[in-house]
Image (cartoon, coloured by chain):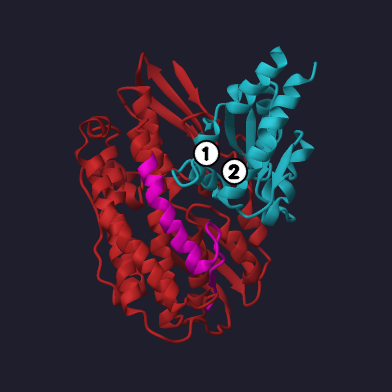
Amino acid sequence: MILPIGPIHPALKEPVRLKLKTQGEKVISAEIDYGYVHRGIERVMEGKTWQKAIFLSERVCGICSYIHTQTFAETFEKMAGEKVPLRAQYLRSLTNELDRIQSHFIANSTYFKALEHETLFMYMLHLREPVMDAIELLTGNRVNMGWNVVGGVRMDAKEKHLNSIYQIITHLESEYDKYVQMFDQGPLVGLRSKDVGKMSNEDAIKGRAVGPIGRASGIKHDVREDHHTYQDEFDWKVIWRKEGDNYARTMNRFDEITESIKIIKQVIENIPPGEVRKKIDIPAGYEEWRNEAPRGEVSYYIESNGNLIKNISIRTPSIMNIDVCGKYMLKDVATVADAVATYASVDPCVACTERVVILNEKGEKREFDGLHKVKYLK
Amino acid sequence: MLDGLKDVVRKSSIHVCLINTGGCNGCDIEVVALLSPRYDLEQYGIYVHNNPREADVLLITGAVTEQWKKNLQRIYAKAPEPKVVVTIGNCPLTGDVFNQEGCSVYAPVSDFIPVDAEIPGCPPRPSEILAAILAVGPDAIAAKGRQKP
């Protein structure tokens, strides 16, 4: 029997359609359809200056909006062959880690909501609010921050604001362990999470899983390792696990929050004085740049004629993660309730994924446009 | 008397369905933030459960995409009377940054379904969303409920 879920459904926060093939209560396989929020952002960006396009790149995804502007700006900076001032690099890392913390909190809270564990859901959102305050203190906005520009960040952070953020983070660190223990050692949550939605290491590599989903299945890969600021300035380590089940994915995100707290403390303790923005002349050329978003690797490919963007392509992590979820995790799941929880554990961000280029067997490019229509491009 | 009783019941228990018709997710997570203990939406008798078939308030975030042109009206028809539509953010109002040449959005939402309240902002703060739902929700639902078909 085919059981359709969505696009608007109590279990889902975003419009997506799950088609579960069930036998009694057991889920045999699943198919995931998306295309409900395709807006065509990349097409609009073409022929615009970066000053206009950076606002569009911010609105690719609302949850991880920060990393999109950073990657966009760093692609242009690489094109010009320049690095931003060190203080700006520190401030970018600070905002990036704050954004990662709030995104992981909301991902885990959604997972607990899918498990119907309302208590932890509320605790997670309660811990998240101070972090949102810290983001607002630093950038002036809660979600779409408008914080990055090509050449640095928009404005300098005041000393007293950095001190307040340090206090917020210290308080979070002292509270945090209690709630992680609740998940880690809670018998009922463990029963619903361990050995559910398992993905083996081979499947994760085959499906190109990225971010916490890939790392929970034993792929030790974090793009921050290749980033010059994280390489040179901070002491941190990549979190990874081997189990590959819902428990590992959730726990992986919890441990990454601990790591982010460590980085934020180093940033505020060691931040150097100086400029936060410098003028960069953008040459004509083609460049690509990758960064670690909360959900995994996000890549930007930009071709510019020196002033306007000629061509731009964005790859977001959720497209691979939703794909491996449908293919490998939602296979032989014991109950439909577990299937919904497994889908939530992948931390899907549908607004991110709605830009796909599909190649057919002849190598012709097809543009993904809506759910059933596919236009051929020459 | 029956109308008065129905008014009390309708005002004190409001079910909300959140529909993302092609936004960036930013407004959606601000609605999720409303559930947190700091704002605590449920103390006002408002319950977010995303089921259009028992919704009193439809919260709409996002400009209308190709897929949603027909589906939005279908979902609106599925919600039982009396119902109120509240749109969140700039996207349902004007299309925001997406409303440009080449983009496949068809804002505003009011072209497709009747809208009762609109909250501008990209995204609006959770407190603004809460204030708008409370300002328009209970009274409008009660008033619409008293209208004879």
Kindly indicate which chain is depicted in red in the rendered structure: A
Residue A278 % position (x, y): 53, 84
Identified by mark 2, the residue type is Leu
Q: Is residue B121 above or below residue A276?
A: above
Residue B41 % position (x, y): 52, 38
Q: Which of the two residues, B84 or B20, is positioned nearer the viewer here?
A: B84
**Looking at the image, do the residues carrying marks 2 and 1 touch, with CB atoms under 8 Å apart?**
yes
Identified by mark 1, the residue type is Leu
* Residue underneath mark 2: B130
Would residue A363 be counted in the magenta stretch?
no
Which badge, 2 or 1, comes first in the chain's sequence? 1
Structural crowding at the residue carrying mark 2, measured as other residues with C-alpha within 10 Å and reported as few (<14), some (14–19) or many (≥20): some
Q: In the figure, residue B136 lies in which quadrant?
A: top right
- Using residue A284 as the reference point, say whether residue A75 is left or right of it: left
Q: Say the numbered circle drawn on residue B41.
A: 1
What is the magenta range? Answer: A122-151
